[in-house]
């Protein structure tokens, strides 16, 4: 059935503006083909917002996001705003909007495409058939705990509540149930009290609510090793904030390029933030050569998770896959002299959709 959706668009900084501009026509094509109407509302976040409004997340941006069906984000940051002593930094805008929307689960699918296997530093035979989603807890743990600093020491408090663990484990288990029915929970329960709480809560939630999903526990250090040595063994991986931050960057190497990896940040409501996992890539910004596929795949996740348009999401993913099959690669993946531009890559996806 045709729907109307209000989508807040936050291009941000650097290549953010280029990859988002390339992705909107893909969503417009989906809307036209299926009779949907998507209204795009563009707002500032990150460095551009600091320049224009003095803050990385203007109130108008947060209010628009709170009223929207979904948020599509490019990337924030860049050398202009990277003074470590600066009071306002672009990345604060990301933390604030996730918090403001109550988003606590960050989903990062890792599915190396056959045509791009050669771009990964990992042996191709280990990568064939890999299909993982990492679910990272997004609003708790050491990144959000109290911090102290004196001349002689510093502390970062790591804290998790039972409710914080329950909700992210439920999100991951529901996802595992829709996929291959296997959940790996990653912690450091041999050392950390927060990890022992994480493990106890996970065991209880899974026993009481998801007896049909197979649960396995992994210590984060051995997980870091197994992710590279036997990535096919994993389906859904759930973990706390800092472990997830590190493991997802490691997992991105399986796919060959940061420019291929999408993400969704979800809460209990339908609104989510959809963005590529990479940053604003200042080294290539303004050249029109950034890979738009991660952002287009993030838009597919937006269609699926916030708008409930599964068939349309699958069609976008298939169109990106067809473009990769045809070796329509931007410079991060292409052989010398064979690269297409950001716009050409997105245009190929639109042609494959049609
Ligand atoms: N979510 C975000 O907005 C986010 C995430 C990470 C970093 N950042 C910020 O981005 C800025 C740059 O950080 P960085 O250089 O460490 O990481 P980055 O992800 O921006 O870039 C790392 C490398 O990957 C390349 N790359 C990234 N995306 C690409 C794409 N779509 N196509 C082709 N190549 C691509 C870049 O050219 C660069 O060589 C920093 O200010 C950082 O704080 C923002």
Image: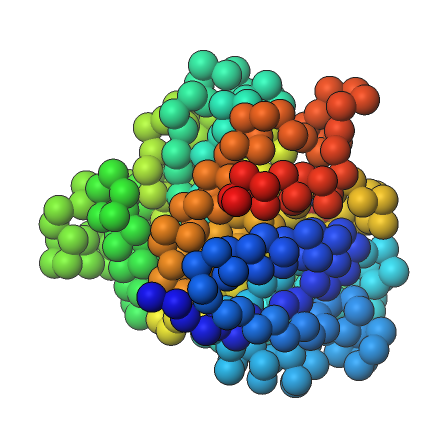
x 12%, y 50%: residue:
211
Quarter of the image with the N terminus is bottom left
Above or below, comparing residue 43 to residue 12 in the picture: below
Could you say where residue 130 lies in the image, as x and y percent from the top left?
40, 29
Q: Is residue 36 visible?
A: yes
**Position of residue 178 in the picture relative to residue 91 (left or right):** left
**Residue lying farthest right?**
80
| Viewer-proximal residue among 289 and 197 | 289
x 42%, y 21%: residue:
128
x 52%, y 60%: residue:
32
State which quadrant residue 186 falls in: top left
User: What is the tally of numbered marks visible in this picture?
Assistant: 0
**Position of residue 56 in the picture relative to residue 79 (left or right):** left
Above or below, comparing residue 302 to residue 314 in the picture: below
Could you say where residue 30 lies in the image, as x and y percent from the top left?
50, 56
Could you say where residue 280 lies in the image, as x and y percent from the top left?
74, 52
x 48%, y 56%: residue:
33
Above or below, comparing residue 336 to residue 17 in the picture: above
**Position of residue 17 in the picture relative to residue 211 (left or right):** right
| Viewer-proximal residue among 345 and 72 | 345
Could you say where residue 18 lies in the image, as x and y percent from the top left?
75, 53
């Amino acid at each position: 059935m045709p729907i109307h959706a209000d989508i807040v668009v936050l291009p941000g900084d650097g290549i953010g503006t280029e990859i988002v501009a390339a992705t909107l026509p893909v969503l417009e094509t989906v809307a036209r083909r299926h009779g949907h109407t998507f209204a795009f509302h563009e707002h500032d976040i990150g460095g551009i917002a600091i320049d224009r409004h003095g803050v990385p997340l203007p109130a108008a941006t947060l209010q628009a996001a709170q009223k929207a069906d979904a948020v599509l984000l490019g990337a924030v940051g860049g050398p202009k705003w990277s003074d470590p002593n600066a009071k306002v930094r672009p990345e604060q805008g990301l933390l604030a909007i996730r918090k403001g929307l109550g988003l606590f689960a960050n989903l990062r699918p890792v599915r190396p495409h056959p045509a791009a296997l050669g771009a990964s530093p990992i042996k191709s035979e280990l990568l064939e058939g890999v299909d993982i989603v990492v679910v990272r807890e997004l609003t708790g743990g050491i990144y959000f705990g109290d911090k102290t600093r004196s001349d002689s020491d510093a502390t970062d408090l790591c804290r998790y509540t039972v409710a914080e663990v329950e909700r992210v484990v439920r999100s991951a288990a529901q996802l595992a149930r829709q996929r291959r029915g296997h959940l790996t929970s990653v912690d450091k329960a041999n050392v950390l009290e927060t990890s022992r709480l994480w493990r106890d809560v996970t065991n209880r939630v899974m026993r009481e609510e998801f007896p049909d999903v197979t649960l396995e526990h992994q210590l984060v250090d051995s997980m870091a090793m197994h992710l590279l040595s036997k990535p096919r063994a994993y389906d859904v991986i759930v973990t706390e904030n800092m472990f997830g931050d590190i493991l997802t960057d490691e997992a991105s190497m399986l796919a060959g390029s940061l420019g291929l990896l999408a993400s969704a940040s979800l809460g209990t409501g339908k609104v989510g933030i959809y963005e590529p996992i990479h940053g604003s890539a200042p080294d290539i910004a303004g050249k029109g050569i950034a890979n738009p596929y991660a952002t287009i795949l993030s838009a597919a996740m937006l269609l699926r998770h916030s708008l409930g348009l599964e068939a349309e999401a699958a069609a976008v993913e298939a169109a990106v896959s067809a473009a990769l099959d045809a070796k329509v690669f931007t410079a991060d993946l292409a052989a010398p002299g064979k690269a297409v531009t950001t716009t050409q890559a997105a245009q190929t996806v639109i042609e494959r959709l049609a």
